[in-house]
Image (cartoon, helix red, strand yellow):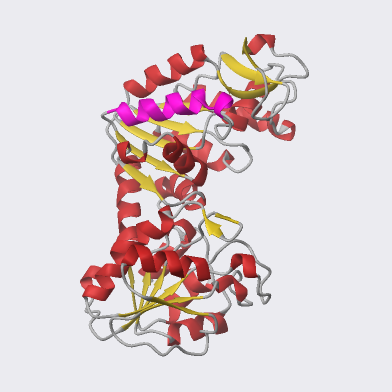
């Protein structure tokens, strides 16, 4: 795959697809991690003498409809501060941009354009006309074939991967293509339905699989335990049984929680009780893993040589329910293993516990991270990456 460092960018109009899909609250950015991750690529383009045009999406607006709350205007301001350069914000950009070398322009939300999600050819051609070179640096959207990720690459005169996209692919490849063993995968989060494929794939290349959150709840139900009112997908209990059987067949150690923290409600003032998984009452809700399970899981992590982590093991946003996820994060941070963490909630947990600098690599992708884990062993590429290679 061609990389931006292989190209002469001087006096070229360089269109960079970044991922500025940052969390917002009342018009304010609550985490600028994804913006900061794009800075090296933007600075590299500027140092090379390029005119830099940035494209990104934000949220899920209805195409063709402008939504003030999903405007990238606040991102342009924050980017200017982080970059130390003036960033011009362009609301109407699709029919052309006035820009010269050394300037940076951030275009309004690409998803305000009809056809973005469906990878419309006409829209992609308009985007391609804006530039001499297209750089894809948005790993977090690389699993989607959209106009600004895949379509534009089809029509651009030249195309290449940005620094961040290259780093992401190298980090993940190192973790699963030829990993040091034992390889420990940690899969948490709310829904097993969104991770069935990746769980099956992980069982093909991991030595240990730690599960938490709603995923673990569904697997506990699949194993015949009462889980009360806990977050669960009862329609997938049979699929859960298959996952448990597959782990045994593949000889991957996948211990289920043996004790959990339960509560009657999800609230900051909720009372909590530690229970064995065999003691859960019909009105209990599992909100975290218990101390016995923490000891078991962290012992596995301590022996790891490679760690892949996606998803918390409890409702860590509430302090009373955060001990399990914090213990996992601490164990990963202290480990000498090569560790890769990805997904918005995982990053948020690491930031909450001030441990983000202790992980070998933090991926900006959530869905892309999972899809890479699911498909890389089969020799498949993410759609936006494939478009760069065509």
Residue 386 location (% of width, % of height):
41, 64
The relative height of residue 12 versus residue 317 in the rendered view (above or below) is below
Residue 332 is drawn in which quadrant?
A: top left
Q: In the rendered view, does 265 fall on the left or right side of 197?
A: right
**Quadrant in which the N terminus appears:** bottom left
Res 380 visible: no
Res 317 visible: yes
Say which residue appears at 42% left-offset and 74% top-offset.
Answer: 54
Residue 56 location (% of width, % of height):
49, 68
Q: In the rendered view, does 226 fall on the left or right side of 137?
A: right
The relative height of residue 250 versus residue 92 in the rendered view (above or below) is above
Residue 226 location (% of width, % of height):
72, 17
Which of 133/97 is in front?
97
Say which residue appears at 63% left-offset and 65% top-offset.
Answer: 69
Residue 347 location (% of width, % of height):
45, 43
Q: Which residues are drawn in magenta?
A: 319-335
Say which residue appears at 64% left-offset and 26% top-offset.
Answer: 217
Q: In the rendered view, does 198 fall on the left or right side of 336?
A: right
The relative height of residue 74 versus residue 301 in the rendered view (above or below) is below
The relative height of residue 69 versus residue 332 in the rendered view (above or below) is below
Q: In the rendered view, does 284 fall on the left or right side of 99?
A: right
**Quadrant in which the C terminus appears:** bottom left
What secondary structure prevails in the magenta region? helix
Residue 276 is drawn in which quadrant?
A: top right
């Amino acid at each position: 795959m061609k990389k931006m460092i292989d190209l002469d960018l001087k006096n070229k109009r360089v269109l960079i697809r970044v991922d500025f899909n940052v969390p917002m609250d009342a018009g304010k950015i609550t985490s600028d991690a994804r913006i900061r991750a794009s800075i090296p690529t933007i600075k590299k383009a500027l140092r090379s003498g390029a005119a830099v045009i940035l494209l990104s999406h934000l949220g899920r607006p209805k195409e063709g409809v402008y939504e003030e709350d999903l405007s990238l205007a606040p991102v342009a301001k924050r980017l200017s501060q982080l970059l130390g350069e003036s960033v011009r914000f362009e609301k109407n950009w699709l029919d052309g941009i006035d820009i010269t070398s050394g300037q940076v322009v951030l275009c309004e939300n690409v998803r305000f354009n009809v056809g973005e999600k469906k990878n419309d050819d006409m829209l992609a051609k308009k985007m391609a006309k804006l530039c001499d070179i297209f750089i894809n640096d948005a790993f977090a959207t690389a699993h989607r074939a959209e106009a600004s990720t895949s379509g534009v690459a089809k029509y651009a005169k030249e195309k290449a991967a940005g620094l961040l996209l290259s780093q992401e692919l190298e980090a993940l490849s190192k973790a699963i293509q030829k990993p040091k063993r034992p390889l420990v995968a940690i899969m948490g989060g709310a829904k097993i339905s969104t991770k069935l494929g990746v769980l099956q794939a992980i069982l093909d290349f991991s030595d240990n699989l730690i599960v938490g959150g709603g995923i673990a709840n569904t697997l506990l139900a699949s194993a015949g335990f009462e889980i009360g009112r806990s977050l669960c997908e009862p329609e997938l209990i049979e699929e859960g049984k298959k996952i448990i059987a597959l782990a045994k067949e593949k000889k991957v150690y996948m211990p289920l929680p043996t004790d959990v923290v339960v509560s009657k409600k999800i609230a900051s003032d909720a009372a909590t009780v530690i229970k064995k998984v065999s003691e859960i009452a019909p009105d209990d809700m599992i909100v975290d893993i218990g101390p016995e399970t923490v000891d078991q899981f962290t012992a596995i992590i301590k022996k790891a040589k490679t760690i892949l982590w996606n998803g918390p093991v409890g409702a860590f946003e509430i302090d009373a329910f955060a001990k399990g996820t914090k213990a996992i994060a601490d164990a990963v941070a202290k480990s000498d293993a090569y560790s890769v963490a990805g997904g918005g909630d995982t990053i948020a947990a690491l930031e909450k516990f001030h441990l983000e600098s202790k992980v070998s690599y933090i991926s900006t992708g959530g869905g892309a991270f999972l899809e890479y884990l699911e498909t890389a062993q089969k020799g498949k590429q993410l759609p936006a990456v494939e478009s760069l290679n065509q």
